[in-house]
């Protein structure tokens, strides 16, 4: 068993070469073709994955840009809204102040008219009283106690009518 048999070595080498030739023709080419196809499939998958990664990065960048634009737009809208609110507030305050000034001016004018009318009426009543007192003075004697009594009566009459 441990003897070296040259005939067996030759037949083993010939058999090995024949098996290699058969395998090369029948199995080696399909095996290499399958390996090449698998390699190409992996290479294509890697290329597709890289392309998808680049597209994802591009979409991420676009999304971030759109998000930034939306944030800027929302800040602009809020700022514009605040400015518009401040303008409306100022306009309303101006209108309210103008309206209140107008109402105050009208009230002052009305008070002045009423005051003037009261003064005219008071002057008329005072002149009537002066005429009445003068008529009584003319009718009565002009002694000092009588004169004092007429004056006191006129003052009482004036205070009663006020």
Image: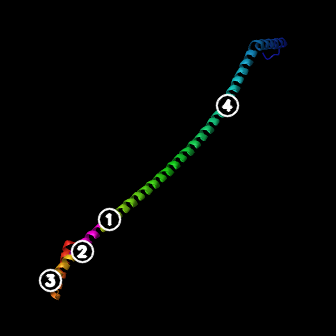
Point out the tag, 4 or 1, that comes first from the N-terminus: 4
Point out the tag, 2 or 3, that comes first from the N-terminus: 2
Residue on which disc 4 sits? 51
- Residue 160 sits above or below residue 110 on the image: below
Q: Is residue 152 left or right of residue 112?
A: left
Q: CA distance from mark 1 to mark 2?
A: 21 Å
Query: Residue 140's mark?
Result: 3
The quadrant of the image that shows the C terminus is: bottom left
**In the rendering, at what x and y percent does residue 93 appear?**
43, 56
Q: Nearer the viewer, mark 4 or mark 1?
A: 1
Viewer-closest of 61 and 39? 61
Asked whether the residues under the numbered discs 3 and 1 touch, taking CB atoms below 8 Å apart as contact, a structural biologist would say no
Residue on which disc 1 sits? 113
Q: What colour scheme does the image use?
A: rainbow
Q: Nearer the viewer, mark 3 or mark 1?
A: 3
Point out the tag, 4 or 3, that comes first from the N-terminus: 4
Point out the tag, 3 or 1, that comes first from the N-terminus: 1
**In the rendering, at what x and y percent does residue 113 appear?**
32, 65
The magenta stretch is: 117-129
Residue on which disc 2 sits? 127
Q: CA distance from mark 4 to mark 2?
A: 112 Å
Residue pictured at 73% horizontal, 15% vertical: 30
Mark 3 burial class by Cα count in 10 Å: few <14, some 14-19, many 20+:
few
């Amino acid at each position: 068993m441990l003897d070296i048999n040259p005939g067996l070595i030759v037949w083993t080498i010939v058999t090995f070469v024949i098996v290699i030739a058969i395998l090369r023709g029948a199995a080696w080419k399909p095996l290499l073709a399958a390996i090449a196809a698998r390699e190409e499939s992996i290479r294509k998958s890697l290329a597709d994955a890289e392309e998808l990664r680049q597209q994802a990065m591009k979409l991420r960048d676009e999304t971030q840009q759109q998000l930034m634009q939306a944030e800027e737009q929302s800040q602009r809208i809020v700022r514009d809204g605040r400015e518009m609110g401040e303008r409306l507030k100022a306009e309303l305050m101006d209108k309210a102040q103008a309206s209140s000034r107008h109402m105050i001016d009208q009230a002052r004018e009305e008070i002045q008219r009423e005051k003037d009318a009261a003064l005219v009426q008071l002057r008329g009543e005072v002149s009537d009283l002066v005429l009445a007192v003068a008529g009584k003075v003319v009718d009565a004697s002009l002694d000092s106690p009588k004169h004092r009594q007429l004056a006191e009566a006129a003052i009482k009459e004036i205070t009663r009518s006020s």
